[in-house]
Amino acid sequence: MNILELRHVEKVYGEHENQVRALDDINIQVKEGEFIAIVGTSGSGKSTLLNLIGGLDAPTGGEIYIRGREISSFKRKELTIFRRRNIGFVFQNYSLMPVLNVYDNVALPIAFDKGRHTRGKYIEELLRELGIWDKRKKYPNELSGGQQQRTAIARALVNKPAILLADEPTGNLDSVTTIEVIGLLKASCRKYNQTILMVTHNEGIAQTCDRIIHIEDGRISRGGSLFPEKGGDDVC
C-alpha cells in the first residue's frame, strides 16, 4: 500500500529570466513502513522536496497524495490540522522551544491539537525508549546535541504520524551520536511501522536505508537502490 505518492511534481521560483526550476517532473511512490534516504548535492532540490511533502510549501505543478488525499486541495486550516496529525518533522537544528523542558517540548504538538487527549503514558514510553526519560525536566540548553535530537524525534513521533520527514537529522552530531540517532530512527520505523524520508549527504547512512532516491538538478537522477529489509542492523 502506498502511503505517499508524488505525480509529476514541479516547483518553480521566480519569473521570466529570474526563474529557477527547483524540482522538475518528480514521480515517487512510497510504501507504508519504508525508510528512504534522499541524497544529492547541495542545491539539488532535496529540502525543497521535503518541504512540499510536508505541506510547508506548495508545488507549482503536479499532485502530492498522503494516505490517498491530495494535500494541495486542502484549505489552509485543513492542511494545518492534517499536517499536525499525519506528518512529523525532525530538523538538523532541533527546533526545540528553549523555554520548555523536554517533556513539554514533546507534548507541544498535542497541546496545539485541542481535540486530542494528552498521551502521558505514550510520552513516557517514547522518552524511555529514546533514553531521555531522566532528562524530562531539563531544558534544551542543559542537553547535549544528541539529547536534543532525541527530544526532537520524540516530539515528531508523539502524534503517531503517518510519515516522518527528517532533514539532515545528524548534520550537527558527532559520528558516535549519529550512529545512535540513526539506530533510533530505524527502530522507530520497525516498531511503529513508521514511514521515514530522510535527507542526508552521508552515503554511508543512506546505504542502511530500504531505498535511496538520488536527486540532481531538481530531477530524480537514477533508480533507487534496494537494500535488505529495513536496511539491516548496521548503521555505518
Image (cartoon, grey):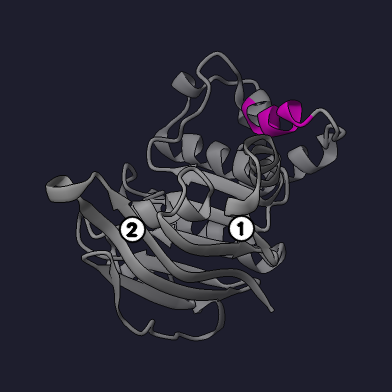
User: Is the residue marked by circle 1 packed among few (<14), some (14-19), or many (20+) residues within 10 Å?
Assistant: many
In terms of secondary structure, what is the magenta stretch mainly?
A: helix
Residue 111 forms part of the magenta stretch: yes
Q: What label sits on residue 163 in the rendered view?
A: 1
Query: Residue at left 31%, top 73%?
Result: 214
Q: Earlier in the sequence, mark 1 or mark 2?
A: 2
Q: Is residue 2 left or right of residue 18?
A: right
Q: Quadrant of residue 59?
A: bottom left
**Range of magenta residues:** 105-113
Estimate the x, y position of residue 231 in percent, counting from the top left: 49, 77
Horizontal relation, residue 202 to residue 18: left or right: right
Q: Residue 158 appears in which quarter of the rendering?
A: top right
Q: Is residue 89 magenta?
A: no
Residue 11, by quadrant, is bottom left
Q: Secondary structure at mark 2?
A: helix
Q: Taking 155 as reference, is 231 above or below it?
A: below
Q: CA distance from mark 1 to mark 2?
A: 16 Å
Crowding near pointer 2: few (<14 within 10 Å), some, many (20+)?
A: many
Furthest-left residue in view? 17
